[in-house]
Image (cartoon, rainbow, N blue to C red):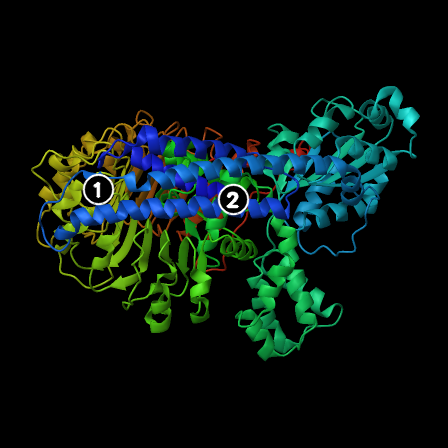
Amino acid sequence: MAYAAVISLMNTIEGLRNSSRISFDVTPCPEIIEPAYEELKSLQEILKRLDGSSKSSIRMNALDAQIRDAVSQFEDKLESHISNQFLSQSDESIDGDESHPLVVSIDLQDLRLDFCSFVEMAKRMEEEYVDQLINMTEEEEDDDDEVVSSRIDFSGNKLNTKMVGFSDLFGLIKDGIMGDEWFRILAIVGMAGIGKTTLVNEIFQDKMVLSRFERCAWVKVGRKFQLHEIARNILAQVKHPVTDEEISEKGVSLYLKEILKKKRCLIVLDDVWDRSVWDYLRSSFPYGYEAYDPNPTSQILLTTRLQQVANAALQANYDGMKEMRFLNKEESWDLLRDKVFGEDPCPLKLEKVGQKIAENCEGLPLLIVRVADLLSKAEKTPEYWNKVAEKRNSVFVDAYDQILEVLYPSYEYLPQHLKACFLYMGVFPQNYEIPRSKLINMWIAEGTFLEPSMLEKSEYHAVNYLNELISNSLVSSHRATCWWFVGQELMKTISIHSALGHMATKIARMNNFFHVLSSRFDGLEEDMEFQRRLCIHNNILFGIRELYESVGNDSASIARSLLCLGPFHRYPVPVYVNSRLLRVLDALNIRFYEFPLKVLKLVRLKYLALTYNGDLPTSISKLRNLQFLIIHRHTSIHSCGSLSSSYVPLEIWDMQELKHIEVLGSNLPNSNASVSLEKLSKLLGVSAYSCTKGVLERISNLKKLGIQIELVVDDDNSELFGRLNSIGSLRNLDSLKCVVVNPEMRCGVIPPPAPRSMFPPNLRKLTLSGLGYPWEYMSILAKLGNLSVLKLQCYAFQGPRWEIKEDEPFTFGFLQIEDTDLAEWKVAPGGMPCIRKLSIKHCYNLEELNWEPDNYVISKIEVVDCNPSLVARVNQIEAAQLARQYPNLSVSLHSSWDDAKRRSTPAPVESKKTFWDRVPLHSGNLL
C-alpha cells in the first residue's frame, strides 16, 4: 500500500500548489514543496517496477510497509497543519453569517525541517528498494530450475473432480473441437476457483475427444515459468522424449512445429498469466492459427484469469473467448449435496437450509467444495446448518481463509495502481451492488487512487481502472445497456464475490487501509488505530456508547473516510465526525433530525452525503474543498407544491470546487452576484424552479442534469413548464432526466409543447417521466441527431397511437417504453435505422406493433408484462429475422401472471452454420 500512500500525498501537495484559496506567507514552493513532490514522483516510478513480479519477499513487504507508514505520517502532519490554520482563520464565523476570507494565508515555515527530513528519508528508502529489487531478480534467476519443475505439469493430469454444471459450455467446446474446421485457439476466462481447469479436464478426458487426436498435451503454466521449457514439455507429450542433440539442430520452437505438422494434437495451456507464453509458442504452430487449413492438425485450449492474456492470443477473434459463469442456485445445491452426502440422499430436514447455504456461496465451485468439506465433518442437524446459513458461526470464514491461497495471486499480480482500487471494494457490505457513479465519485474524493495528472479527466481514468479490474476477473459489472452508443453507460452497477471481499477486507486491515465495524466487538481501539478509513456495516453501532467513545478516543483521528454503508436506519444515531482530516463522509443511510454542525469543522472534506429534511446551514460554505454534495430527504408526507421550496442556501455559490450536487426536490437558488460554479458537471434532483436563465448560465459546463417537477393542483402549470425552455442553453449537456413526481393523467390535460429549444443539440441520453405529452411531440426528439438513448416512463407520452414516419427517422440505439396507454405503434420502413435494443414494459394496451426491422442491427427485444397480442407480434419479428439468417437477435419475455418465461433465439438449422457461428460474440469490457 506504499504506492497508494505516495499518490495520496502527491495529490495533497498538488492541491496546495494549485489552490486558488491558499496564499503562502513565504513562498515555499521552490524551497520546500517542490523537492518533496519530485522525490515522490521518483518513489512512485520505483514502486511501479514491482508490477507483475512473480515473487515477493518478507523483506520487500516490510520495506513497502515502512514507506507506507513514513509517507502517511508526513501527510498527516501536513494536513493537520493546514486544517488548523484554516480553522483558526474562520472559527469566528462558524455559527453566524459573518463574511469569511475567500483566500486563506498558510505558513509552512514550521514544517520546513519536516519537509527536508522527509526528502532525505525518501531518498534512503528508494535506494534500499532498488537494492531489494535487484536481489529479487538475482534470486529468481538462481532458482529457475526449481520454478519449472514445481510449477509446470506436463504429465497430462487427470483431475479426480466431478464437473457439476457448465454442460452448455462443455457441449459448445466439444462440438468445436470435433468439427472439421481450420485451426483455432479457444480461451476460457474466469476468476480463480470458478472451474476453468475442471471444465477443460472434462474435455481432455472425453473419449470422443481423445479419439479425435493422435496426441494430447497438458501444461500447467502458472505465474513462474520458462518459455523454452513449456515447448519442451509439449514435445515430451506429443512425441517420445527427444534428446538435446535433436533439438539443438533447429531449436525447440521449430522442432515442435515440425512435429505438429505431422500429428493432430490437443494442447491445453492451463493457468496462463502472461501473454508472452502465446507470443513465444505462436510460431510453433503450422500455418498460423488464423490461416485456413483444410486438414487441421492442432487445437489449443487456454485457461486464464486475465482477459488481456486471452485477447492477446485471440487477436480480436472474440468468438474464441468464453467467460466462465458462476453456478446457478440449482447447480450450486447439486454440487454441495454431492460433496456432503455422495451417493446417499440428503435428509429432507436439511434440504431447504442446505439450498440456502449453497446460495450463500454465490456460485463459486471452489467455495462450495470447501464449505461442503467443513459441513461433512460437522454435525448434520438443522440447528447447526441454520447457523451456517445465517453465518452465525465460523464455517464461511474458515472456508474463505482456506481458499485465500488460491485467490491471493489475483491480487498480488495486479499492477500497483489497481491494488488500492480493488481493496476499496471491500468497504461495501457483502452482496452490495455498487453504483458505478458512487464508487467513482468516492475514488475521486479520496485522492488515493488517481495520479495528479489524471484529475482533469478523472472519471475517464476511473472507468478505465474498473475495466482493468473486470479484465482481471476480480469485479463483475451489471445492468448493461447499449455499449456501442452510450459508452460508459454499459456499467451501471458492479460487485465482487464475497470470497474476494473477505480477502480485500483482510488485506486492507493488515495494511491500515480500512477497518470494518459489523459488531460491537470490532470497535476496539487497537483495531482502529492508524486505519485510514472506518466502514460501518451496521449503522446502529454508533448508538452503543462504548463503541462511540472508543471511536472518539483519538483512535480514529487520522481517518480520511467514514462510510456508514449498512442498511438504512430511520432513527438518528450520533455519528462520530471529529476526525478533522476526513475527506469522505457518507452517512446517507442514517436519518438526521438536525444537521450535524461538527461537519462544518471538516475543512478537508470533499464528499458529503446525508439524509436530512431540514435546511442546510448557510455556513456550509465553509467547506470550500467540497466536491460532492449529496443531500436526500427522508420519505415523508408533504403538501403539494412543497418541492418548489429550497433547502439549499444562497452561499452554495461560494463553493467553487463543487463538481456534483444532488439535492432531491430543492431549488438551486439564484444569486445576484456574478459568480459561477465552473467545475459543476452534475446537478441532480433539483426542481424545475432552478431552470432559469440566471441560474443555468452560471453552470454552463453542466454535463448531466436531473429535474424533479411537482405539479400544482388546479393550475395549468404553464409557467413551471416554461422554465424548461432554458435547458437548451446548456451546450455541453450530455444527459437529461426530467420526472414529474405527481403526474396527472386525464383526458384533455396536456402540458404545453416541449419546444426543440428545451433539448440541447449534443444531448445523448434522455429520460422523461410523467409529462403526458401527445405522441405527435416525438417529432421534436427526432431532430436530435446525437440522441442515442431514450427512456419514456410513466406516461411520458400519452395517447392510443404513435406513428414513426420515414421522413422523420429516429437515430437512437436504445429505446425504452414503460407504463403508457399506447395501443397501436406503427414504424415506417427506415423509421428506426439504428435501433439495437428495444425494451417495452407494462404497456397493457399495446396490441399492435406494425414494424418490420429492416436494418439487421437490432440485437435484443425485451417485453415485460405486456399484452399477449404484443408478445405474439414480437415472436413474429423474431421468426422473420431468423428467416433472413440473422441469428443474433435475442428475445426476452417475462410475465408476472404466468410462469416467468425467458428464452434466447435457438441456433439456425445446422446446414452451413459452424460451431464458431453459434458461440455468442464476446462483448469485452467496453464502457
Image quadrant where one finds the C terminus: top left
Q: CB under 8 Å between callouts 2 and 1?
A: no
Q: What secondary structure is marked by label 1?
A: strand
In the displayed structure, would residue 128 be above or below residue 630?
above
Tell me the crowding category of disc 2: few under 14, some 14 to 19, or many 20 or more residues within 10 angstroms, Cα based: some
Q: Nearer the viewer, residue 433 or 872?
A: 433
| Location of residue 619 in the rendering, given as x and y in whole percent from the top left corner | 15, 51
Q: Residue at x 33, y 30 (%)?
A: 31
Hey, which quadrant is residue 887 in on the image? top right
Label placed on residue 419: 2
Q: Residue at x 31, y 30 (%)?
A: 29
Label placed on residue 773: 1
Q: Amino acid at mark 2?
A: Lys
In the displayed structure, would residue 302 be above or below residue 542?
above
In the displayed structure image, the side of residue 123 where residue 808 appears, left or right: left
Whether residue 652 appears in this view of the structure is yes
